[in-house]
Amino acid sequence: MQVQDPGQREAAEATADDREVHGTTPYRTLYLMDTPYGSAPLPVWERPEPQPRAAPVPLSRAKIAAAAIRLADEHGLDGLSVRKIAKELGVGPMRLYDYVLNRSELLDLMVDAVYARIAEGDEQASWRDTVLAIVHRTREAALAHEWFADLLGARPHLGPHAMAVGEATAAALSQAPAVRSIDDLQRALGGLSAFVVGALRREITERRTARSTGTDVTAWQAALGPYLRRMLDTGRYPTVARLVVEGAHLDAEETFHHNVTTVLDGITGHRAQP
């Protein structure tokens, strides 16, 4: 169903820049669907791209998402706004509203563009290799686009490429010998997702902290070393002492692979009946 939008768009999640220019939005066509809670806009994935028009700078959702990704890579999600994206593209901010209704839709497009890269990859020989390949590509994407980790595990990712990654992961896990029912599959997916989201967020947070403070692990240890030594000398923390004295600084990629392999084998292995 199509209706004419007089510019009073329900954009509860709009940024300050969005609200500043909201009242001047020109009339344009919205596509609505009926739900048990009333009419709502069709998801961005189901709305057609606006018809091309004569303009010095042609636009598309893919082009807008690419510009937004460049800005978020440089400044993070807090530095992202419709006004800045429009400036990056060389157009007026209001033109972007022909393509996205609000900030949430913009983030959806950005996230799905990253999932498009995750979905790429050669076919693997086994279900286990397939899952590990997807997980490692997800880590590579998060390291290349740190903001992506902030959005993992948040609102559902329902774009076509995100759905393709979800389908490939679920289909592979469903082939694990110990995954015999839909309940087993749900638990396996939940366990794997919980590990991946937590591990990536921790790794990204450590990278950001080191970058923002200018302090690497060696400098941090040097600064807190005397205090830690005094605490360990009390004898109250013998296991922590072993970790500090005997433990090595592990390679992040190798550790991620070891841990995700352990988790994957655990959640798909044979489990004793409770």
Image: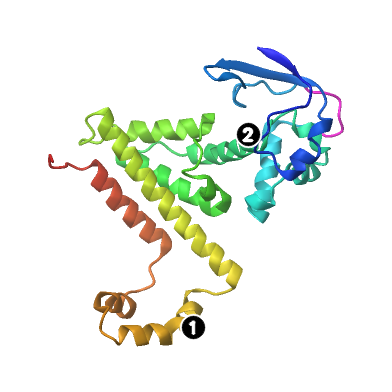
Residue 126 can be seen in this image? no
Task: Tell me the element at label 1.
Answer: helix
Q: Is residue 77 above or below residue 25?
A: below
Q: Which residue is mark 1?
A: 223
Left or right of 270: which side holds 189?
A: right
Quarter the N terminus occupies: top right
The image position of residue 12, as x and y in percent, is: 66, 35
Task: Say which amino acid is labelled 2.
Answer: Glu
- Which comes before the other along the chain, label 1 or label 2? 2
Left or right of 248: which side holds 153?
A: right
Task: Say which amino acid is labelled 1.
Answer: Ala
The magenta stretch spans which residues? Answer: 52-57
The image position of residue 174, as x and y in percent, is: 29, 32
Q: Is residue 265 above or below residue 41?
A: below
Task: Verify whether residue 189 appears in magenta.
Answer: no
The image position of residue 256, as x and y in percent, is: 38, 56
Q: Which residue is mark 2?
A: 105
Splitting the image into 4 quarters, where does residue 31 fall?
A: top right
Going 59% across and 73% down the picture, which residue do you hit? 214
| Structural distance between the alpha carbons of marks 1 and 2 | 44 Å
